[in-house]
Amino acid sequence: MRGRAVEVVVTSTPPSAVDAVVAEEDTYLVLSADPEVREPDGARLRAFHEAYTAEPAAPGTVVVQGGSPLRLLAVVHDLSQDPSWREEWIAAALQAVLHEGDSRRVRTLAMPPLGRVHGSFPRERFVSLLRSALLTGAPRHLERIWVVAPEEETDELRSLLESRLWR
């Protein structure tokens, strides 16, 4: 790859310390929501109003949540559609993740293979899209991406990263 080389490592266990973590998300940010039911702060009526008037995030964008590590929600699903993901949304979200990470000087990033956590996006296409995003985005600060996948997918993803798809 031209420009600065970014090491991509496939693992089933995320490293203990990274600058940013990417989560696969849907337009209403339901997929990463805390499943614990809690009494809403403030008046219930206001909470219902906020839920009713919530605006969806656009597919292909990234919602930034603070914290350390920085949490980036890659919006690649619209749960009202079947399938809920689209390749162009995944491609755009990868670009947005790299852009956002670069603007925040992220050096290390952990992410799942987008479209596969809550969908059936082909591994080969994810690898191709990640490669393309790195080539066109050319992040200045990023040094390493940890692709965090289930144990049963790590060997296949590693093979894809060593194949012609990555070169």
Image: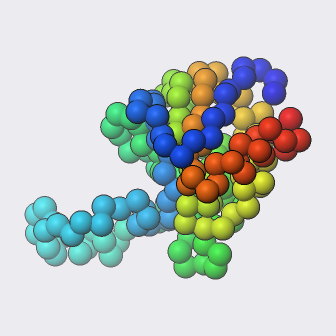
Q: Is residue 124 visible?
A: yes
Q: Is residue 98 visible?
A: no
In this view, the residue in front, 107 or 64, is 107
In this view, the residue in front, 19 or 28, is 19
Q: Is residue 149 left or right of residue 161?
A: left
Q: Is residue 95 left or right of residue 19?
A: right
Q: Could you tell me residue 137's position as x and y percent?
A: 71, 34
Q: Could you tell me residue 67's position as x and y percent?
A: 33, 37
Is 32 above or below relative to 167? below
Q: Is residue 17 left or right of residue 135?
A: left
Q: Quadrant of the C terminus?
A: top right
Is 90 above or below relative to 53? above
**Displayed quadrant of residue 54:** bottom left
In this view, the residue in front, 62 or 83, is 83
Residue at coordinates 67% horizontally, 28% vertically from top-left? 7
Q: Quadrant of the N terminus?
A: top right
Residue at coordinates 35% horizontally, 62% vertically from top-left? 33
